[in-house]
Image: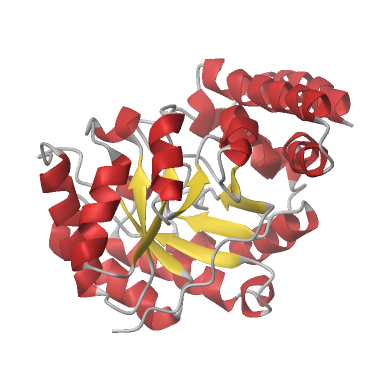
Amino acid sequence: MTVQWQRFAKGTLVAPVHSPFSAGGGATAACASIAGQARYLVAEGFNAVFVCGTNGESFSCSLAERKAMLEMWMSTEEVRAKKLRMLAHVSCLAPPETVELARHAAALGVDAVSYMVPCFFKPVGDAAVAKMLADFALAVPTTPVLFYHFPDMTGVACSMERVLVAAREAAPNVVGAKFTHNDLADMQASIRAGFDVLIGSGDELLLPSLVLGTAGGFSVPGMMGGNRAILGIFEAYERGDLAAAAEYQDTARQMLGLLKRHPAGFVGAGKALAERAMGGAAPLGPPRPPISALSDAAELERLAAEMGRLIEKAR
């Protein structure tokens, strides 16, 4: 079957969006805030979103919630006007549920679905990972598939290049990957093999990834007012000013490090800062356990001030 895939353009900046939860913890009732998220992200320079990924607490959401959130994202003016490309992460621990979410996403017309291998009972070895990826892709044969390679979270070590090449032989709709790892040689090999690869840890590794051939990446601090640093990397690189690009990269790295070091973690702290940055336009609510919430107002303001100093540095 023919797969229509528009390769990522240079300067692709993806928002790994947070899932909105109501004060009572439900996601479906909070979906209305997604419209505000979409408007904010476009204004901040993002041109794609990754729904229900790590920041989106995918494995903490029900199938019904994940479907409702994706439907709301697809209904936003920004997605319908093609200002935001839609990348839907659909993985679950149960493979049949993964396929159910993928077919739902495909029916909605997403740009691509993203697949992560199970992280409880795990495939072992490149061949086993490739077979799981190919079997998944064959369930949605006309929808482009991106492999979500995040070994620090899945605990599954593999050669992404070998996995992608083997999977593509069986399922031509395997077109690329979200690469959240530091083995840039593996990333480059995948790009040279013809795959469309975005760097998941763009706040730390966007600049070297651009040099090696990626079109763009993901940013967490960019969703909370820190977009100037990540956009600065793209702009400086394009004009050939690697020294300036390196300075922007270092600032983006510090921004992400600030979130990683916080007791609430980069999801809990990041979600609170993102909600604050949107100024009430898109309430996100607290994360779900076991992720900690940043609920202390004084601590939130202290963290925002520290992030603000890094944001000013990037301007």
Between 152 and 31, the one lying in front of the other is 152
From the viewer's perspective, tell me whether residue 157 is left or right of residue 229. Answer: left
From the viewer's perspective, tell me whether residue 208 is left or right of residue 230. Answer: left
Between 231 and 55, the one lying in front of the other is 231
Query: The C terminus is located in which quarter?
Result: top right
The spot of residue 123 in percent (x, y) is: 11, 41
Residue 108, compared with residue 100, is above or below; it is below
Residue 278, compared with residue 194, is above or below; it is above
The quarter of the displayed image where residue 169 is located: bottom left
Residue 38, compared with residue 159, is above or below; it is below
The spot of residue 88 in percent (x, y) is: 43, 62
Query: The N terminus is located in which quarter?
Result: bottom left
The spot of residue 238 in percent (x, y) is: 79, 44
- Which residue shows up at 48% across the image and 42% down it? 55
Q: How many marks can you see?
A: 0
Colouring: secondary structure
> Residue 16, can we see it?
yes
> Residue 281, can we see it?
no
Q: Residue furthest front?
A: 192
- Which residue shows up at 25% across the image and 45% down it? 162
The quarter of the displayed image where residue 112 is located: bottom left
The spot of residue 171 in percent (x, y) is: 23, 68
From the viewer's perspective, tell me whether residue 124 is left or right of residue 153. Answer: left
From the viewer's perspective, tell me whether residue 11 is left or right of residue 147. Answer: right
Residue 53, compared with residue 34, is above or below; it is above
- Which residue shows up at 48% across the image and 71% down it? 111
